[in-house]
Image (cartoon, helix red, strand yellow):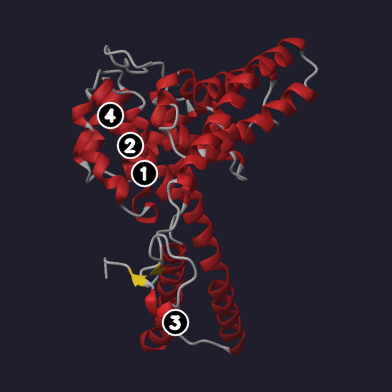
Amino acid sequence: MADDVGLKPDTSLNPPLVDPEAQRVRRLLRALVRRRELVSVVTKLLKGEAVQFHELQSELSQFTAPPVRHWRRQELTCWALRHVEIDEPARTEATRWLCYLEDGTRDADLGDRLINAFSRTGIGVGGLLAAFILAPIGGADFNLEFDAFFSILLIVLSVYLPICSFRADTEHCRSVRVAAIKTLGRLAHPNALASVCRAALSRNSRVASASSEALWPILRSIRTEHYGLLGSQVVPNLCSLLRPASEQEVFLLLDALEKIGDGRAVEPVEAVAARSLSPELVERANNLLPILRARRARETAQRTLLRASSDPAPAEDGLLRAAGSGSADEGQLLRSADR
Protein backbone atom coordinates (compact mmCIF):
# COMPACT_ATOMS: atom_id res chain seq x y z
CA MET A 1 0.00 0.00 0.00
CA ALA A 2 2.97 2.27 -0.44
CA ASP A 3 1.76 3.71 -3.76
CA ASP A 4 2.01 7.39 -4.53
CA VAL A 5 -1.62 7.89 -5.48
CA GLY A 6 -2.63 7.94 -1.82
CA LEU A 7 -5.68 6.65 -0.04
CA LYS A 8 -9.14 7.70 -1.14
CA PRO A 9 -11.61 8.71 1.55
CA ASP A 10 -13.84 6.03 2.98
CA THR A 11 -17.30 7.40 2.27
CA SER A 12 -19.13 4.16 2.93
CA LEU A 13 -21.03 5.55 5.89
CA ASN A 14 -24.46 4.09 6.41
CA PRO A 15 -27.46 6.37 7.03
CA PRO A 16 -27.10 8.17 10.39
CA LEU A 17 -29.90 6.23 12.05
CA VAL A 18 -28.26 2.91 11.15
CA ASP A 19 -24.56 3.55 11.65
CA PRO A 20 -23.69 3.59 15.40
CA GLU A 21 -20.28 5.10 14.68
CA ALA A 22 -21.81 8.08 12.90
CA GLN A 23 -24.24 8.56 15.78
CA ARG A 24 -21.35 8.61 18.24
CA VAL A 25 -19.48 11.12 16.08
CA ARG A 26 -22.50 13.43 16.16
CA ARG A 27 -22.72 13.16 19.94
CA LEU A 28 -19.04 14.07 20.25
CA LEU A 29 -19.54 17.01 17.88
CA ARG A 30 -22.19 18.52 20.13
CA ALA A 31 -19.65 18.66 22.96
CA LEU A 32 -16.97 20.32 20.80
CA VAL A 33 -18.81 23.28 19.31
CA ARG A 34 -15.89 25.61 20.14
CA ARG A 35 -13.46 23.57 17.99
CA ARG A 36 -14.76 25.14 14.82
CA GLU A 37 -12.06 23.85 12.45
CA LEU A 38 -12.43 20.24 13.59
CA VAL A 39 -16.22 20.47 13.67
CA SER A 40 -16.21 21.86 10.12
CA VAL A 41 -14.03 18.99 8.82
CA VAL A 42 -16.06 16.29 10.54
CA THR A 43 -19.36 17.81 9.40
CA LYS A 44 -18.18 17.79 5.78
CA LEU A 45 -17.12 14.16 6.10
CA LEU A 46 -20.49 13.20 7.54
CA LYS A 47 -22.12 14.81 4.50
CA GLY A 48 -19.92 12.73 2.19
CA GLU A 49 -17.79 15.64 0.99
CA ALA A 50 -14.10 15.20 0.18
CA VAL A 51 -11.59 16.55 2.71
CA GLN A 52 -7.83 16.89 2.23
CA PHE A 53 -5.31 15.88 4.88
CA HIS A 54 -3.94 19.41 5.30
CA GLU A 55 -7.35 20.55 6.60
CA LEU A 56 -6.90 18.22 9.56
CA GLN A 57 -3.13 18.47 9.99
CA SER A 58 -3.23 21.14 12.70
CA GLU A 59 -5.24 18.81 14.94
CA LEU A 60 -2.49 16.18 15.11
CA SER A 61 -0.41 18.11 17.63
CA GLN A 62 -3.10 17.63 20.29
CA PHE A 63 -2.31 13.89 20.27
CA THR A 64 0.42 14.75 22.80
CA ALA A 65 -2.18 16.09 25.27
CA PRO A 66 -3.48 13.91 28.13
CA PRO A 67 -6.38 11.80 26.81
CA VAL A 68 -8.23 12.17 30.12
CA ARG A 69 -8.90 15.82 29.26
CA HIS A 70 -8.98 15.77 25.44
CA TRP A 71 -10.49 12.38 24.60
CA ARG A 72 -13.42 13.73 22.56
CA ARG A 73 -11.18 15.82 20.34
CA GLN A 74 -8.67 13.01 19.90
CA GLU A 75 -11.31 10.40 19.08
CA LEU A 76 -12.95 12.68 16.50
CA THR A 77 -9.61 13.42 14.87
CA CYS A 78 -8.87 9.69 14.60
CA TRP A 79 -12.25 9.12 12.99
CA ALA A 80 -11.69 11.96 10.51
CA LEU A 81 -8.26 10.59 9.54
CA ARG A 82 -9.94 7.39 8.39
CA HIS A 83 -12.01 9.29 5.85
CA VAL A 84 -9.75 12.04 4.44
CA GLU A 85 -7.80 11.86 1.19
CA ILE A 86 -4.19 11.21 2.11
CA ASP A 87 -0.97 10.72 0.12
CA GLU A 88 2.14 8.77 1.10
CA PRO A 89 4.07 11.51 2.99
CA ALA A 90 0.91 12.47 4.88
CA ARG A 91 0.22 8.81 5.64
CA THR A 92 3.68 8.49 7.19
CA GLU A 93 3.17 11.62 9.29
CA ALA A 94 -0.30 10.59 10.43
CA THR A 95 0.97 7.12 11.37
CA ARG A 96 3.73 8.62 13.50
CA TRP A 97 1.25 10.78 15.42
CA LEU A 98 -1.24 7.93 15.82
CA CYS A 99 1.43 5.59 17.19
CA TYR A 100 2.39 8.29 19.66
CA LEU A 101 -1.26 8.62 20.70
CA GLU A 102 -1.78 4.85 21.02
CA ASP A 103 1.37 4.35 23.07
CA GLY A 104 0.62 7.37 25.26
CA THR A 105 -2.99 6.34 25.86
CA ARG A 106 -1.92 2.80 26.76
CA ASP A 107 0.43 4.26 29.37
CA ALA A 108 -2.00 7.00 30.37
CA ASP A 109 -0.95 8.60 33.61
CA LEU A 110 -2.76 7.05 36.56
CA GLY A 111 -2.26 10.31 38.41
CA ASP A 112 -4.39 12.27 35.91
CA ARG A 113 -7.30 9.90 36.37
CA LEU A 114 -6.99 9.96 40.17
CA ILE A 115 -6.81 13.75 40.25
CA ASN A 116 -9.89 13.97 38.05
CA ALA A 117 -11.76 11.49 40.26
CA PHE A 118 -11.04 13.30 43.52
CA SER A 119 -11.65 16.73 41.96
CA ARG A 120 -15.12 15.68 40.82
CA THR A 121 -15.78 14.12 44.21
CA GLY A 122 -14.71 17.29 45.97
CA ILE A 123 -16.97 19.42 43.79
CA GLY A 124 -19.97 17.12 44.28
CA VAL A 125 -19.58 16.67 48.01
CA GLY A 126 -18.68 20.32 48.51
CA GLY A 127 -21.80 21.42 46.66
CA LEU A 128 -24.01 19.24 48.84
CA LEU A 129 -22.37 20.50 52.02
CA ALA A 130 -22.80 24.11 50.89
CA ALA A 131 -26.47 23.49 50.18
CA PHE A 132 -26.92 21.83 53.58
CA ILE A 133 -25.22 24.72 55.38
CA LEU A 134 -26.98 27.51 53.48
CA ALA A 135 -30.45 25.98 53.46
CA PRO A 136 -31.33 27.04 57.05
CA ILE A 137 -30.48 30.61 56.11
CA GLY A 138 -33.28 30.46 53.57
CA GLY A 139 -35.71 29.26 56.23
CA ALA A 140 -35.54 25.48 55.59
CA ASP A 141 -36.18 23.33 58.64
CA PHE A 142 -34.41 19.94 58.67
CA ASN A 143 -35.37 17.17 61.04
CA LEU A 144 -33.20 14.34 62.34
CA GLU A 145 -34.40 11.92 59.67
CA PHE A 146 -33.32 14.28 56.92
CA ASP A 147 -29.96 14.85 58.63
CA ALA A 148 -29.36 11.09 58.76
CA PHE A 149 -30.34 10.70 55.11
CA PHE A 150 -28.05 13.56 54.11
CA SER A 151 -25.13 12.03 56.02
CA ILE A 152 -25.64 8.67 54.31
CA LEU A 153 -25.83 10.40 50.93
CA LEU A 154 -22.52 12.17 51.56
CA ILE A 155 -20.85 8.88 52.52
CA VAL A 156 -22.19 7.12 49.43
CA LEU A 157 -21.05 9.94 47.14
CA SER A 158 -17.63 10.06 48.77
CA VAL A 159 -17.14 6.35 48.05
CA TYR A 160 -18.80 5.81 44.68
CA LEU A 161 -18.19 9.10 42.89
CA PRO A 162 -14.38 8.67 42.62
CA ILE A 163 -14.82 5.04 41.53
CA CYS A 164 -17.32 5.98 38.81
CA SER A 165 -15.18 8.90 37.68
CA PHE A 166 -12.04 6.75 37.48
CA ARG A 167 -13.84 4.06 35.47
CA ALA A 168 -15.32 6.65 33.10
CA ASP A 169 -11.89 8.18 32.43
CA THR A 170 -10.42 4.73 31.86
CA GLU A 171 -13.17 3.95 29.35
CA HIS A 172 -12.60 7.27 27.57
CA CYS A 173 -8.86 6.51 27.25
CA ARG A 174 -9.75 3.08 25.92
CA SER A 175 -12.09 4.61 23.32
CA VAL A 176 -9.30 6.89 22.12
CA ARG A 177 -6.96 3.93 21.90
CA VAL A 178 -9.44 1.88 19.87
CA ALA A 179 -10.04 4.83 17.53
CA ALA A 180 -6.29 5.26 16.99
CA ILE A 181 -5.83 1.54 16.28
CA LYS A 182 -8.68 1.48 13.76
CA THR A 183 -7.13 4.43 11.95
CA LEU A 184 -3.71 2.78 11.92
CA GLY A 185 -5.33 -0.24 10.28
CA ARG A 186 -6.99 2.00 7.71
CA LEU A 187 -3.68 3.71 6.84
CA ALA A 188 -1.82 0.36 6.89
CA HIS A 189 1.66 1.85 7.19
CA PRO A 190 4.51 -0.56 8.13
CA ASN A 191 5.66 1.79 10.90
CA ALA A 192 2.43 1.05 12.76
CA LEU A 193 3.26 -2.64 13.17
CA ALA A 194 5.01 -2.35 16.55
CA SER A 195 2.15 -0.44 18.19
CA VAL A 196 -0.62 -2.59 16.74
CA CYS A 197 1.16 -5.88 17.56
CA ARG A 198 1.57 -4.79 21.14
CA ALA A 199 -2.08 -3.73 21.34
CA ALA A 200 -3.22 -7.07 19.86
CA LEU A 201 -1.84 -8.76 22.97
CA SER A 202 -3.92 -6.54 25.28
CA ARG A 203 -6.08 -8.17 27.93
CA ASN A 204 -8.92 -5.80 27.10
CA SER A 205 -11.27 -7.39 24.56
CA ARG A 206 -12.15 -4.10 22.81
CA VAL A 207 -8.53 -3.16 22.26
CA ALA A 208 -7.50 -6.69 21.23
CA SER A 209 -10.40 -7.02 18.78
CA ALA A 210 -9.71 -3.66 17.12
CA SER A 211 -6.00 -4.50 16.92
CA SER A 212 -6.65 -7.89 15.32
CA GLU A 213 -8.70 -6.24 12.58
CA ALA A 214 -6.10 -3.52 12.04
CA LEU A 215 -3.14 -5.89 12.01
CA TRP A 216 -3.81 -7.78 8.78
CA PRO A 217 -3.72 -4.86 6.32
CA ILE A 218 -0.53 -3.67 8.02
CA LEU A 219 1.06 -7.10 7.64
CA ARG A 220 0.27 -7.05 3.91
CA SER A 221 2.23 -3.80 3.59
CA ILE A 222 5.44 -5.30 5.03
CA ARG A 223 8.39 -5.72 2.65
CA THR A 224 11.78 -7.41 3.01
CA GLU A 225 13.48 -4.01 3.21
CA HIS A 226 11.77 -3.44 6.57
CA TYR A 227 13.91 -6.18 8.18
CA GLY A 228 15.40 -4.85 11.42
CA LEU A 229 13.71 -1.44 11.12
CA LEU A 230 10.36 -1.86 12.87
CA GLY A 231 11.34 -2.23 16.53
CA SER A 232 13.03 -4.84 18.67
CA GLN A 233 9.78 -6.31 20.05
CA VAL A 234 7.92 -6.74 16.75
CA VAL A 235 9.20 -10.29 16.10
CA PRO A 236 8.43 -11.64 19.62
CA ASN A 237 4.97 -10.06 19.50
CA LEU A 238 4.25 -11.56 16.08
CA CYS A 239 5.33 -14.95 17.41
CA SER A 240 3.01 -14.55 20.40
CA LEU A 241 0.11 -14.05 18.00
CA LEU A 242 0.76 -17.34 16.18
CA ARG A 243 -0.96 -19.55 18.75
CA PRO A 244 -4.41 -17.88 19.03
CA ALA A 245 -4.63 -16.99 15.32
CA SER A 246 -6.76 -18.77 12.73
CA GLU A 247 -5.18 -20.72 9.89
CA GLN A 248 -5.47 -17.86 7.40
CA GLU A 249 -4.04 -15.43 9.95
CA VAL A 250 -1.12 -17.77 10.68
CA PHE A 251 -0.27 -17.74 6.96
CA LEU A 252 -0.14 -13.93 7.06
CA LEU A 253 2.02 -14.00 10.19
CA LEU A 254 4.42 -16.49 8.61
CA ASP A 255 4.64 -14.32 5.48
CA ALA A 256 5.57 -11.35 7.68
CA LEU A 257 8.14 -13.40 9.60
CA GLU A 258 9.71 -14.46 6.31
CA LYS A 259 10.28 -10.79 5.53
CA ILE A 260 11.25 -9.36 8.93
CA GLY A 261 11.65 -12.35 11.29
CA ASP A 262 14.94 -13.03 13.05
CA GLY A 263 16.41 -15.94 15.00
CA ARG A 264 13.92 -15.51 17.84
CA ALA A 265 11.16 -16.79 15.55
CA VAL A 266 12.72 -20.25 15.03
CA GLU A 267 11.13 -22.01 18.01
CA PRO A 268 7.62 -20.52 17.54
CA VAL A 269 7.62 -21.50 13.85
CA GLU A 270 8.84 -24.99 14.76
CA ALA A 271 5.88 -25.22 17.13
CA VAL A 272 3.50 -24.28 14.30
CA ALA A 273 5.00 -26.99 12.10
CA ALA A 274 4.69 -29.55 14.91
CA ARG A 275 1.13 -28.87 16.07
CA SER A 276 -0.68 -27.76 12.90
CA LEU A 277 -3.22 -30.13 11.35
CA SER A 278 -3.07 -28.38 7.97
CA PRO A 279 -0.56 -29.91 5.51
CA GLU A 280 -0.29 -26.56 3.69
CA LEU A 281 0.51 -24.76 6.92
CA VAL A 282 3.09 -27.37 7.95
CA GLU A 283 4.75 -27.07 4.55
CA ARG A 284 4.77 -23.26 4.78
CA ALA A 285 6.36 -23.35 8.24
CA ASN A 286 8.98 -25.92 7.18
CA ASN A 287 9.90 -23.80 4.15
CA LEU A 288 10.36 -20.78 6.40
CA LEU A 289 12.54 -22.48 9.02
CA PRO A 290 15.78 -22.63 6.94
CA ILE A 291 15.55 -18.87 6.36
CA LEU A 292 15.09 -18.12 10.05
CA ARG A 293 17.85 -20.53 11.09
CA ALA A 294 20.26 -18.91 8.64
CA ARG A 295 19.43 -15.50 10.10
CA ARG A 296 19.97 -16.82 13.63
CA ALA A 297 23.35 -18.23 12.65
CA ARG A 298 24.30 -14.90 11.10
CA GLU A 299 23.17 -12.99 14.20
CA THR A 300 25.15 -15.36 16.45
CA ALA A 301 28.26 -14.89 14.33
CA GLN A 302 27.90 -11.11 14.49
CA ARG A 303 27.59 -11.17 18.29
CA THR A 304 30.66 -13.41 18.53
CA LEU A 305 32.68 -10.96 16.41
CA LEU A 306 31.53 -8.05 18.54
CA ARG A 307 32.63 -9.81 21.73
CA ALA A 308 36.01 -10.68 20.21
CA SER A 309 36.63 -7.08 19.14
CA SER A 310 35.84 -5.69 22.57
CA ASP A 311 38.55 -7.46 24.64
CA PRO A 312 39.65 -5.29 27.55
CA ALA A 313 42.85 -3.30 27.00
CA PRO A 314 45.89 -3.98 29.22
CA ALA A 315 45.72 -2.36 32.60
CA GLU A 316 47.20 1.09 32.67
CA ASP A 317 49.37 0.26 35.64
CA GLY A 318 50.59 -3.03 34.15
CA LEU A 319 54.34 -3.73 34.06
CA LEU A 320 56.03 -4.68 30.81
CA ARG A 321 58.79 -7.29 30.77
CA ALA A 322 61.83 -6.41 28.67
CA ALA A 323 62.21 -8.46 25.49
CA GLY A 324 64.55 -11.43 25.75
CA SER A 325 64.62 -11.28 29.52
CA GLY A 326 63.94 -14.35 31.55
CA SER A 327 62.89 -13.94 35.09
CA ALA A 328 63.47 -10.42 36.27
CA ASP A 329 62.86 -8.57 39.45
CA GLU A 330 59.84 -6.31 39.55
CA GLY A 331 62.11 -3.30 39.89
CA GLN A 332 63.66 -4.10 36.47
CA LEU A 333 60.30 -4.26 34.68
CA LEU A 334 59.23 -1.36 32.46
CA ARG A 335 56.05 0.55 32.93
CA SER A 336 53.85 1.45 29.97
CA ALA A 337 55.01 4.55 28.10
CA ASP A 338 51.40 5.81 27.87
CA ARG A 339 51.34 6.91 31.48
Sort mark 4 into few (<14), some (14-19) or many (20+) by Cα contacts within 10 Å.
some
The residue that disc 2 covers is 96
Query: Mark 3 and mark 2: span between their CA atoms?
Result: 48 Å
In this rendering, position of residue 129 left or right of residue 246: left
The residue that disc 4 covers is 43
Contact between marks 2 and 1 (CB within 8 A): the answer is yes
N-terminal label among 1 and 3: 1
Q: Which mark is residue 129?
A: 3
Instruction: Determine whether 267 is above or below 115 in the image.
Output: above
Contact between marks 3 and 2 (CB within 8 A): the answer is no
**Looking at numbered disc 4 in the image, what kind of residue is underneath it?**
Thr
N-terminal label among 4 and 3: 4
Sort mark 1 into few (<14), some (14-19) or many (20+) by Cα contacts within 10 Å.
some
Q: Nearer the viewer, residue 28 or 73?
A: 73
Sort mark 3 into few (<14), some (14-19) or many (20+) by Cα contacts within 10 Å.
some
Query: Mark 2 and mark 4: span between their CA atoms?
Result: 25 Å
Q: Nearer the viewer, residue 188 or 205?
A: 188
Instruction: Determine whether 75 is above or below 18 in the image.
Output: below
The residue that disc 1 covers is 100
N-terminal label among 3 and 2: 2
Query: Mark 2 and mark 1: span between their CA atoms?
Result: 6 Å
Instruction: Determine whether 7 is above or below 334 in the image.
Output: above
Residue 53 at x, y percent in the picture: 23, 26
**Looking at numbered disc 1 in the image, what kind of residue is underneath it?**
Tyr
N-terminal label among 2 and 4: 4
Query: Mark 4 and mark 3: span between their CA atoms?
Result: 43 Å
Please name which of the two marks, 3 or 2, marks the residue nearer to the observer.
2
